[in-house]
């Protein structure tokens, strides 16, 4: 009796493993392809901001820069803007005004400085 139960359990585990392996080989379907295409499209488009622009943005989240400084992650028309020189009192969802300072090398994101709460 124990031998039959072990064989059935082994078959189920084997079937789950093969199912998982097939899913990995296929790459998860169209969702991954769509994400990759959106990424490629974003790399090709012109940024919706220019250096010196003042924008009103909402803070989506915070990240720690490699220098250890806290930066806010904001977006302008889906374009990522990292904001530096933040007061500690700011929280996610706060609306602030920022000034665009520079772009990264591929112009896929920008760095801005905090001006004031909006």
Image (tube, rainbow, N blue to C red):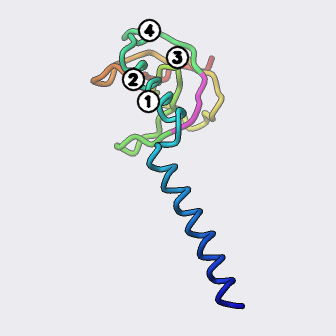
**Mark 1 touches mark 2? (CB < 8 Å):** yes
Using the image, determine if residue 5 lies above or below residue 83: below
Q: Nearer the viewer, residue 9 or 88?
A: 9
| 47 lies left or right of 34 | left
Expressed as whole percent of the image width and height from the top left, the position of residue 33 reads 47, 31
Mark on residue 36?
Answer: 1
| 76 lies left or right of 105 | right
* Dot placed on the residue nearer the N-terminal end, 4 or 2: 2
Mark on residue 76?
Answer: 3
Kindly state the secondary structure of the residue where label 4 is placed. Answer: loop
Q: Residue at x 62, y 80 (%)?
A: 7
Expressed as whole percent of the image width and height from the top left, the position of residue 112 reads 43, 22
**Mark 3 touches mark 2? (CB < 8 Å):** no
- Disc 3 residue crowd, few under 14, some 14–19, many 20+, Cα 10 Å: some
Q: CA distance from mark 1 to mark 2?
A: 6 Å
Q: CA distance from mark 3 to mark 2?
A: 18 Å
Mark on residue 40?
Answer: 2
Q: CA distance from mark 1 to mark 4?
A: 29 Å
Expressed as whole percent of the image width and height from the top left, the position of residue 45 reads 39, 12
Check if residue 44 falls in the magenta segment.
no
Is residue 85 at least partly visible in the picture?
no
């Amino acid at each position: 009796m124990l031998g039959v139960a072990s064989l059935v359990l082994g078959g189920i585990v084997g079937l789950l493993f093969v199912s998982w392996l097939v899913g990995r080989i296929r790459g998860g379907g169209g969702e991954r392809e769509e994400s990759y295409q959106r990424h490629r499209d974003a790399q090709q488009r012109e940024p919706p901001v220019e250096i010196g622009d003042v924008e009103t943005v909402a803070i989506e989240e915070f990240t720690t820069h490699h220098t250890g400084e806290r930066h806010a992650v904001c977006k302008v028309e889906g374009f990522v803007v990292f904001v530096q020189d933040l007061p500690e009192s700011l929280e996610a969802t706060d609306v602030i005004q920022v000034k665009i300072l520079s772009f990264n090398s591929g112009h896929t994101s920008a760095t801005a400085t905090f001006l004031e709460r909006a």
